[in-house]
Amino acid sequence: MKKAVIFDFDGTLADTYQLYVRAFLLTLEDFYGKPLSFQDLVELRPRPEKIFFKEVVGEERFAEIIQKFLFYYEREQNDKFEGLYPGIVEVVSELRQRSLRLGIVTTKSREAYQINRRITPELGEFDLEYTFDEVTKPKPHPQALQFCLEKWNISKEECLFIGDTMADYQPTLRCKMDFGAALWSKNDEEERLFREQMSHTEHVHFFRTPADILQVL
C-alpha cells in the first residue's frame, strides 16, 4: 500500500516548456550578443538551468548569467507559462484527502521553482520539496528520492514517483521504486518512444491523465 507520492514539476505538474525556451533564448542572446534560433538552442542540449549555463558560459560568468536567466524566467512567466495541467489540482487534492504524504523532486533551481509556485497557490503545500539546490546529486541520481524516504521513514515499496522523462525514471530504477509515467504532456510519438524505453520493467504505471493516478493508489 502506498503511503506517499512524489512528483516531478516541469512537464508533470506544470507546463513550463515555452517559458523555459523563451528564457533560455533571451539569456543566450545576451551572452552571445546576437539572437539564437530554436534549433541553435536544441544543439546546445538544454538541461536544468544551473547545469546548462555553467557548462555553456563557464564559471567566470555563471553567476551573472544565471541571474539574467531568472530575470527573464520571471518576466516572461505571464506570457509563456502555460500553468498547471488540467486535472492536476483535483488529483493532488484527492491524494491529500486520502492522507498520503506528498513531495516534489525537481532539477530546476529553487529560484525558478519559487517563481512558478508564487502564481500556482491552488497546488497547495507539499510535505517535502527538493530542487537542484537541496541536493548534491540531482536526478537521474536517486538521492532526493532517498531523502524523502528517510524523512518519512517509509520503504521504497510504499512510495510512487511520477515524472515525464527518462531522467525521472532512472532514479526509480536505481532504487527499485515504482514509477508513474506522466503521458499527458506528450504527443503520440513522444508517448510511443517513452513507453518503449521502459518496456523492460514491471515497476512502471502509465498514466494518460492525472486522474489515472487515483486508480493505482
Image (cartoon, rainbow, N blue to C red):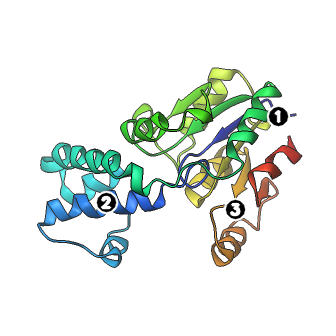
Q: Amino acid at mark 3?
A: Leu
Nearer the observer, 30 or 109: 30
Please name which of the two marks, 1 or 2, marks the residue nearer to the observer. Answer: 2
Above or below for 44 versus 87? below
Above or below for 57 versus 132? below
Residue at position x 55%, y 46% in the image: 9
- Whether label 1 touches label 2, CB < 8 Å: no
Residue at position x 69%, y 45% in the image: 88
Q: Choose top left, top right, bottom left or bottom right for residue 42.
A: bottom left
Q: Amino acid at mark 1?
A: Lys
Nearer the observer, 182 or 58: 182
Please name which of the two marks, 3 or 1, marks the residue nearer to the observer. Answer: 3
Q: Quadrant of the C terminus?
A: top right
What mark, if any, has residue 183 been given in the picture? 3
Nearer the observer, 215 or 152: 215
Q: Where is residue 157 drawn, in percent x and y?
A: 79, 37
- Give the residue number, with chain letter if any, for mark 2: 24
Ranked by sequence position, the earlier of labels 1 and 2 is: 1
Q: Where is residue 151 drawn, in percent x and y?
A: 62, 21
Ranked by sequence position, the earlier of labels 3 and 1 is: 1
CA distance separating discs 1 and 2: 38 Å
Number of numbered tags placed on the structure image:
3
Residue at position x 61%, y 51% in the image: 12
- Give the residue number, with chain letter if any, for mark 1: 2
Q: Is residue 116 visible?
A: yes
Left or right of 72 in this view: 35 = left
CA distance separating discs 3 and 1: 21 Å
Crowding at mark 3 (Cα within 10 Å: few <14, some 14-19, many 20+): many
Q: Amino acid at mark 2?
A: Phe
Above or below for 217 versus 100? below
Nearer the observer, 57 or 170: 57
